[in-house]
Amino acid sequence: MTETLTPPATGSPLALLFDIAATTAQRTNGLVQDEERKVAETAAADHIHTAYPETLGQVVDHDAWIGFPALRDSGVQPGVAAYLGDGLWLHHTITADADHQDALTLLSPCICGHGCVPSLLLDETDLLELLQDLRPTGGRAVHRGDTGGPYCAGIPAA
């Protein structure tokens, strides 16, 4: 026989405790997300200041980063993004592996206008080489191995 569970009576001490617990959980979750955003923003600013002092460290302000909290259900770490202009974005996160390595990605819009191409940057040399490739197209990624247009091989633009 299946027993039907009945919620506590409205206004009862148990109902009030459940409401307090739910409110506290929401507040705590909001504080955790705010802290994750701030930590992610600081980590990104520190990384580009240290690893990209001659390039990104010169042009991306500390407050340019927009933080995003972790998506625990998906296993996604907190991250940040900074807009560079003309459709280019930087994305930074710390990988979940034991080394806690910084992962910096440049997102460049496709030349076709239907998506964007992510490029993982390992160091300042990678960035400079990528910028040399993007310069003739004004920061647009050229398609490799596809025909462009509606069949863009990049990540679809939102």
Image (cartoon, rainbow, N blue to C red):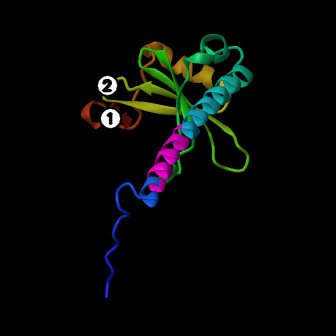
Q: Main secondary structure of the magenta part?
A: helix
Residue underneath mark 2: 112
Decide if residue 39 is on the left or right side of residue 8.
Answer: right
Farthest-out residue, bottom:
1
Foreground pick, 60 / 38: 38
Q: Residues within 10 Å of mark 2 (few under 14, many from 20)?
A: some
- Residue in view at x 67 percent, y 30 percent: 43
Specify whether residue 38 is painted magenta. Answer: no
Farthest-out residue, front:
12
* Dot 2: element: loop
> Counting residues from the N terminus, which is met first, the one under dot 2 or under dot 1?
2
Residue 152 is drawn in which quadrant? top left
How far across and how far down the image is residue 63, in percent? 59, 17
The stretch in magenta equals 17-30
Specify whether residue 28 is painted magenta. Answer: yes
- Residue in view at x 36 percent, y 38 percent: 153
Amino acid type for the residue under numbered disc 2: Cys
Residue underneath mark 1: 152
